[in-house]
Amino acid sequence: MRAALALLCLAASGTAAAAAQVVDIAWTPEGRFTHTATLALRELLEVCGKLPRGGRVAWSFEAGAPLPFNIHVHQGKAVVYPAKLDKAEKAQGLQVFDAEPAHCWMWTNTAAEAVKVSVELQQTPR
């Protein structure tokens, strides 16, 4: 399932990636998730998880170089992008889960060398 999801995301991103790191969000009892990864050239990181419709997540990330970033959700054969940045070293926002499928935060390393990415997600009250 995770491999199929990664392949769908590669197709949706339009980027030929060398490899994919697909991470399932494991929330702490306080509703927090953090993850740090180092991405090789053309490698992507995808962090995915489900919340009930109306759930809210404050998110932020920092990367060692400007990288393409998006938040997306698969709705049938369609991919919807609530957020998409061509290149960013850091960003933050609030994502409201408006659909039941998992929402995914994704980065693709288009830099000339390995890049470290750190992400923090925090569930917030409705």
Image: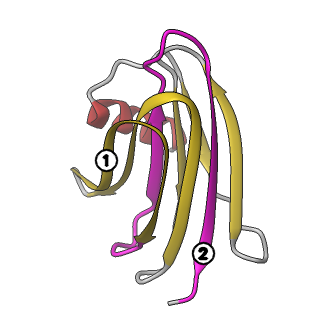
- What mark, if any, has residue 84 been given in the picture? 1
Say what secondary structure mark 2 lies in.
Answer: strand
- Of residue 91 and residue 12, the one placed in the foreground of this image is 91
Q: How crowded is mark 2: few (under 14 residues within 10 Å), some or many (20 or more)?
A: many
- Of residue 51 and residue 113, the one placed in the foreground of this image is 113
Of all residues, the one furthest to the top in this rendering is 112
**Residue type beneath disc 1:** Lys
Report whether 104 appears left or right of 13.
right
Q: How crowded is mark 1: few (under 14 residues within 10 Å), some or many (20 or more)?
A: some
Q: Distance between the residues labelled 1 and 2?
A: 20 Å
Does 110 lie within the magenta span?
Answer: yes
Give the image quarter of residue 95: bottom left
Q: Where is residue 5 in the image (x, y as percent from the top left)?
A: 43, 42
Q: Where is residue 9 in the image (x, y as percent from the top left)?
A: 37, 38
Does 111 lie within the magenta span?
Answer: yes
**Which segment did they paint magenta?**
96-125
- What mark, if any, has residue 123 been given in the picture? 2
Would you say the residues marked 1 and 2 are in contact, meaning their CB atoms lie under 8 Å apart? no
